[in-house]
Amino acid sequence: MTTEWIVYVLLLAGLVACAAAAVDDVLRRAAMPTRWVWVAALLATTVFTAMSMRRTAPTFNPLVTAKMSVSALPTFSTRGGLLETIAHARAWVGGATARIVGAAHYGLSASVQVSLIVAWVTTSAGMLAILFLVHRGMDRERRRWPLALLFDVSVRITPSEGPAVVGITTPEIVVPRWLLARSAEEQRLVVMHEREHITARDHLLLLGGLFIAALLPWHPVVWWAVSRLRLAIELDCDARVLHRGVQVRSYGNLLIDIAGQCAGHRVGALALADQPSHLERRLLAMKNTKPRFTLVRTGSLAAIAMLAVAMACEARLPTSAEVEKMDVASWEKAVVQAKQLDEAGAKNVVYKVAGVVVSADKAHALSANHIARDNV
C-alpha cells in the first residue's frame, strides 16, 4: 500500500458516492426504497479497493516533469453533443486524478508509508474487536431483561434502553419500561416499526456497513456512506409503516417524543429514535410535497450518476512493473491513456534533463534508470 494508492481509492470512492447520492435522490422522489443503493455503493467501494490493491496507483515518476502549453489541457466542448461532452468530462477527471495521485508520492518516505500500513491494520483490528465485543455485550445483556408480549409480539423490557432491535442471528425488539406507560396506539407503532426492521433484515445490512467501515477506517467516504445507509434504512422503514395506513402526524409526533427520551445502544443497533439530523430528514420525507422542476432535477441527477459510474469504471492505472520499466516514450503513452494529455498535447511537451531543455529524440533515448538519475 502507498499514499498514491490511498488517494486513488479515495477519489474512486468519491465518484461512487456521487453516483449513489444521485440515484438515492431519484429513487426517493419516485417513492422507492433506497437502502440498497448504499449497500451497493459500499460493496462497490470494497471491490474497487480490493482490485486496486493488485495494481499500483498512478505513480508517474516524481522526478519526471512535463511543462504543458495551454493547448495540451483538456477542454469541454458541446459542439459534438452529449457524448463528446461526457468524453471530455471523463478525460478531465482522469487527468486530474492522475495529477493528484501523482502529487501524493512526493511528501512521504517509505518508513512513513509502512507506518500507515501498520496503523491501518491496528485500527481495523481494534474496530473489529470493538464491534464484536459490543454485540456480544448486548447479546449477554438482553438475556437478563424480562420478556413481555406487546400486541402479540415478544419484546424485552429494559430499564431505559431502546426502542431498538438487538441481536444478529436471533434479533429481538427491546423497549424501555417507560414505554409501557404510553398509550396503546404508541406502543403499537413502536412495535410495528421495529418489527419491520426485523422482517427486512435491516440489522444485517447495518452490520455489514459497519464491518466495511472497520476494514477501511481511514476512508471518510465509507463512513459517510454508512451514515447514509442508516438513514436510508430508517426512511424505508418509515415508508413501510406509513404504507400500512398509519397517520403521518401521529407517527411524526411519536418520533419526536421518543427521540427526547431514548438512550443507549447506538452502535450496530437499529432504533426508532435517531440522531437530530436524521430525524429532521425523516420528518421532512413524510411530507407529501412536490418540489418544482422535479423532472429536470431527476434527469440531471440520473445523468450525473451515469457519468460518475462511467468515470469510476474507466479508471486505468499502470502496474508497478509498468512503472519500473517506464521510459520517456512509455510515460507519454501512459499519460495519454490516463487522459492527462490528449494526442495533440503530448506533442507540445517540453523536456528538461538536469534543468536543460533537450529535444524529444534525446529525451526518448533515455532509459528508465536515466529518468530517475538525471532528473528528467
Image (cartoon, rainbow, N blue to C red):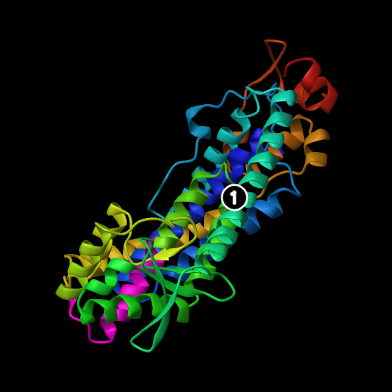
Q: Is residue 108 left or right of residue 251?
A: right
Q: Residue 294: x percent and y percent? A: 23, 68
Q: Quadrant of the N terminus?
A: top right
Q: Which residues are magenta?
A: 231-248
Q: Residue 94: x percent and y percent? A: 55, 44
The residue indicated by pointer 1 is 130
Q: Residue 95: x percent and y percent? A: 55, 40
Residue 161 visible in the current orientation:
yes
Q: Amino acid at mark 1?
A: Ile
Task: Say whether residue 366 is magenta.
Answer: no
66 w.r.t. 99: above or below: above
Q: Residue 372: x percent and y percent? A: 78, 21
321 w.r.t. 252: above or below: above
Q: Is residue 60 left or right of residue 231?
A: right
Task: Say whether residue 241 is magenta.
Answer: yes
Q: Nearer the viewer, residue 231 or 363?
A: 231
295 w.r.t. 21: above or below: below
